[in-house]
């Protein structure tokens, strides 16, 4: 019989060790799955985890992709983690990401064809504002009318998608685009482009913003009174009220910050890797970021690593499909295993495991 | 006469602590046997073993001469052992008879059950209407539901865990009358308590536990309460002392505080008036659930009370907890984990919870963690909090130690007015004495102290004036000195609908 005994305080050693252990266990379980599919498990694992970074044939393309994919994930997840820590559940980052992209792109296109250097910073501001405003809708509805922010923010994703379709086919459509849907290409125009800052690294302004967000979130949570109040509100809401935390302010703040960061991520994407507003501009970063936030234990450094790991499995997974013909669903199952083992092994940091029969019931 | 229940060398260890070490005693039929000890002495573990909730590591029990080792509470009940828990397990939205039927193996038809409930309640002087909703009952009445639930099983041994903590003095008398009658009929009662006067008036024998071991047995009527206290604590306790002081200016003034409860099961406050002067301790007595939590929330600022709360002549009813703290109005709520302290945060982090403003633990919005740690260490040292250090999570502390930390955190901030709710609930006797002394010292230094408590002995011991909170109404304060328990009981609203059923001989006493 296995028994779980709650630790008086979470084990610091296990908090660090469980993610590593989870990756190893995922490799074993995934390897077994690949073997059952008739594929060489060692090769599959190598292709997923190592080849994107170290194989000469692929690394030139894959290595920059790592930051390109991890950047928005980290930026959005950092914002979400603040709310999640306070018990405020913004599930609609995807919508805020879309609205941020539309607002930022709209701002840039309004000045087309000017190449003024102030346009790009203005676009970043507009993107952040757009995401913030979209997140304020569930925020104000929650604080005024006690609606559930999970439902409202999630449903607003679909509203945002409809607005995106309308923008791409109608009011942001490229006037010189021969009637095809989609806006002008922002990344090929000097005034609005979010360029690769260092050649062949994938580093663009969005990645810089993500790193800054990681550091800022770390300082906020560990040193600032606001971060303390966020943690307090999430762990013990009554104690937070007793300490004088204003719940309304906290809800608006957490939703606002996560919305603004998601909006910025959308702007960086539309002006860089994606290049233009198109009907299928959003690819689910806003939802995947929720997984990244939890994978990283809602800790800024954890989110940084989780974002990179998540990006790696996406890139490596695509590569494995391409090179070995592993079905896409097997790759998804593999990613699911990673999430499962990470969360399941989390038990080790809060509980001691004892084997053997127990005298007490 | 053979013993009804005899216990021989029961031992139970949990990781890191021996709850019971070779405990032996015997209970005779018809005897009221007290199990006396501080919190953590092992009383609860012991009765849980008797009731089949916990299996002993070693030792044996016998009931009526036959070996007795219940695997689960059902087996214990089948053998004739019943237990009334300190915390009730009743559904507020069901009526009395439905609640009782839920706990039975084969409940009879509702009509028969209702009749049996009426019979038993009349026989033992515990009036109870089987058709009433449990949600509408007072704590004393809810306890009667639990007792009648046990009596319907015709138990030979009835275990009662701290039964009087939720009762008014009059209700306690009624309960004792019932228990004496049960004992006279041959039912043995195992009575767990740390209230010495109760034990002296009710119990025939007492077994005293300390740190899991039987340290003494005595006949309570033949020894003094002070002697039993020494046996229980292992040292003699000093009664709280203070020099007489003249009350100063009015510091806290509550004028016509009326408040609707936040939740449907809360209690509204109705036109509460109170004033507390510098150097004075005001005691507010009352059974839990009569508005204590609501009163504390209105004073702390968690619930706004415009125009009703005045601190040193200024209206503070609109401002929040942090701003009130800055002005010198500090509070310590009853619920330690989750309200006064965050369970998963360290003591250092919990020190910041209330002391940030008054202790200057932040600079420009950034928390001064070093200063917070120093302050947490000060509290730990000044109030003898037993913990490895300030980095330990609050939930790792025992209730009494955390309470000392919470009270100490407020007192060391040098408040003008301190309001505490149940300051010594669940705290062992020596720690409780320390807390009371600290509150008195604070008053002596010129602060105004409001103590809300269910422990009437405590209130009469440390208060200058006493008032009672009953169904959200606060009585006129009276000088605590010379107040008798009976007067206090009447202020608390007496016994709930019990006046006409008190037997004549009891009423005449």
Image: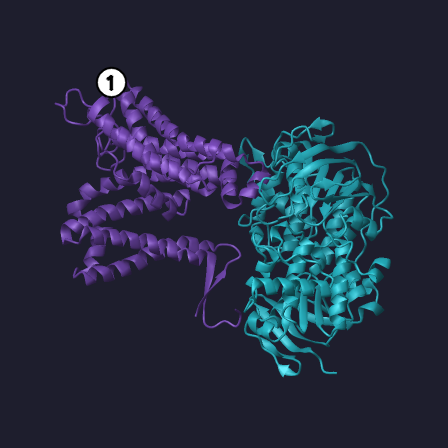
Chain colours: A purple, B cyan
Q: Residue at x 39, y 57 (%)?
A: A345
Residue B268 lies, in percent from the top left, at 65, 40
For the residue pair A88 and B413, the one nearer the viewer reads as: A88
Asked if residue A114 lies left or right of residue A219, the reply is left
Query: On the image, which quarter does residue B294 sit in?
Result: top right
Q: Is residue B37 visible?
A: no
Residue A255 lies, in percent from the top left, at 42, 34
The chain letter for the residue carrying disc 1 is A
Query: On the image, which quarter does residue A290 sit in?
Result: top left
Image quadrant holding the C terminus of chain B, namely bottom right
Q: Residue at x 55, y 40 (%)?
A: A240
For the residue pair B122 and B353, the one nearer the viewer reads as: B122
For the residue pair A179 and A49, the one nearer the viewer reads as: A179
Asked if residue A5 lies left or right of residue B230, the reply is left
Structural crowding at the residue carrying mark 1, measured as other residues with C-alpha within 10 Å and reported as few (<14), some (14–19) or many (≥20): some
Residue B292 lies, in percent from the top left, at 68, 44
Residue A321 lies, in percent from the top left, at 17, 50
Asked if residue B129 lies left or right of residue A204, the reply is right
- B124 versus A51 height, above or below: below
Image quadrant holding the N terminus of chain B, namely bottom right
Residue for badge 1: A115
Which residue is farthest front? B111
For the residue pair B408 and B256, the one nearer the viewer reads as: B256
Q: Residue at x 53, y 70 (%)?
A: A360
Q: Secondary structure at mark 1?
A: loop
Query: On the image, which quarter does residue B113 sit in?
Result: bottom right
Asked if residue A44 lies left or right of residue A297, the reply is left
Q: Is residue A107 visible?
A: yes
């Amino acid at each position: 019989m296995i028994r779980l005994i709650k630790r008086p305080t979470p084990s610091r050693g296990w908090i660090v060790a469980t993610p590593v252990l989870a990756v190893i266990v995922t490799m074993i379980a995934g390897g077994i799955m690949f073997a059952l599919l008739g594929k060489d498990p060692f090769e599959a694992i190598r292709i997923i985890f190592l080849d994107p970074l170290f194989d000469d044939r692929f690394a030139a393309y894959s290595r920059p992709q790592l930051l390109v994919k991890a950047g928005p994930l980290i930026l959005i997840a950092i914002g979400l983690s603040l709310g999640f820590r306070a018990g405020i559940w913004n599930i609609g980052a995807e919508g805020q990401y879309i609205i941020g992209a539309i607002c930022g792109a709209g701002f840039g296109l309004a000045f087309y064809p000017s190449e003024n250097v102030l346009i790009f910073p203005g676009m970043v501001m507009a993107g952040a504002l757009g995401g913030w405003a979209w997140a304020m809708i569930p925020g104000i509805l929650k604080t005024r009318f006690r609606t559930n922010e999970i439902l409202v923010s999630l449903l607003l994703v679909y509203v945002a998608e409809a607005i995106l379709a309308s923008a791409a086919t109608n009011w942001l459509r490229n006037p010189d685009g021969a009637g095809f849907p989609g806006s002008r290409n922002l990344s090929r125009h000097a005034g609005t482009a979010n360029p690769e800052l260092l050649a062949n690294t994938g580093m663009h302004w969005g990645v810089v913003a993500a790193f800054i967000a990681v550091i800022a979130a770390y300082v906020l949570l560990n040193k600032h009174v606001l971060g303390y109040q966020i943690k307090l509100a999430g762990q013990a809401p009554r104690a937070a009220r007793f300490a004088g935390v204003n719940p309304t302010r906290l809800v608006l703040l957490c939703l606002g910050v996560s919305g603004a960061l998601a909006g910025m991520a959308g702007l960086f994407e539309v002006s860089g890797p994606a290049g233009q507003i198109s009907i299928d501009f959003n690819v689910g970063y806003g939802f995947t970021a929720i997984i990244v936030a939890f994978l990283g234990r809602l800790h800024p450094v954890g989110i940084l690593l989780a974002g990179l790991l998540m990006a790696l499995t996406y890139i490596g997974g695509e590569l494995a499909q391409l090179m070995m013909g592993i079905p896409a669903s097997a790759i998804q199952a593999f990613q699911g295993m990673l999430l499962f083992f990470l969360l399941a092994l989390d038990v080790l940091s809060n509980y001691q495991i004892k084997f053997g029969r127990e005298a007490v019931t | 006469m053979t013993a009804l229940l005899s216990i021989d060398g029961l031992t139970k260890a949990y990781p890191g602590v021996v709850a019971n070490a070779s405990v032996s005693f015997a209970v005779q039929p018809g005897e009221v046997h007290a199990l006396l000890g501080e919190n953590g002495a092992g009383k609860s573990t012991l009765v849980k073993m008797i009731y089949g909730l916990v299996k002993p590591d070693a030792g044996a029990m016998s009931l009526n001469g036959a070996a007795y080792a219940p695997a689960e509470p059902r087996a214990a009940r089948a053998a004739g052992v019943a237990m009334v828990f300190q915390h009730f397990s009743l559904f507020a939205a069901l009526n009395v008879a439905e609640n009782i039927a839920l706990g039975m193996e084969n409940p009879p038809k509702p009509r028969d059950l209702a009749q049996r409930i009426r019979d038993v309640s009349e026989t033992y002087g515990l009036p109870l209407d089987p058709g009433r909703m449990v949600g509408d009952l007072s704590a004393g009445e809810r306890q009667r539901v639990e007792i009648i639930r046990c009596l319907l099983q015709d138990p030979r041994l009835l275990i009662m865990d701290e039964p009087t903590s939720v009762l008014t003095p009059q209700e306690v008398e009624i309960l004792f009358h019932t228990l004496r009658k049960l004992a006279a009929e041959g039912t043995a009662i195992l009575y767990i308590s740390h209230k010495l006067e109760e034990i002296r008036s009710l119990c025939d024998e007492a077994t005293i536990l300390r740190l899991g071991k039987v340290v003494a047995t005595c006949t309570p009527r033949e020894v003094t309460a002070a002697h039993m206290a020494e046996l229980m604590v292992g040292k003699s306790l000093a009664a709280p002392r203070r020099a007489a002081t003249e009350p100063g200016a009015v510091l806290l003034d509550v004028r016509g505080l009326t408040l609707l409860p936040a939740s449907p099961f809360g209690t509204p406050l109705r036109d509460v008036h109170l004033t507390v002067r510098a150097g004075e301790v005001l005691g507010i007595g009352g059974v839990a659930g009569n508005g204590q939590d609501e009163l504390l929330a209105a004073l702390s600022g968690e619930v706004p009370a415009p125009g009703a709360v005045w601190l040193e002549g200024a209206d503070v009813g609109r401002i929040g907890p942090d701003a009130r703290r800055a002005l010198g109005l500090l509070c310590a709520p009853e619920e330690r984990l989750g309200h006064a302290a965050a369970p998963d945060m360290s003591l250092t982090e919990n020190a910041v919870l209330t002391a940030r403003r008054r202790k200057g633990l932040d600079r420009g919005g950034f928390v001064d963690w070093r200063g917070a740690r120093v302050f947490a260490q000060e509290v730990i040292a000044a109030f003898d909090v037993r913990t490895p250090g300030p980095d330990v999570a609050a939930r790792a502390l025992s209730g009494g130690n955390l309470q000392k930390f919470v009270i100490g955190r407020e007192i060391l901030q040098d408040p003008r007015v301190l309001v505490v709710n149940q300051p010594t609930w669940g705290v062992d006797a020596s720690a409780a004495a320390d807390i009371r002394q600290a509150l008195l010292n604070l008053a002596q230094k010129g602060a105004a102290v409001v103590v809300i408590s269910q422990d009437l002995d405590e209130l009469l011991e440390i208060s200058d004036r006493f008032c009672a909170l009953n169904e959200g109404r606060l009585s006129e304060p009276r000088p605590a000195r010379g107040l008798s328990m009976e007067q206090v009981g009447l202020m608390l609203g007496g016994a709930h609908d019990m006046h006409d059923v008190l037997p004549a001989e009891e009423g005449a006493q």
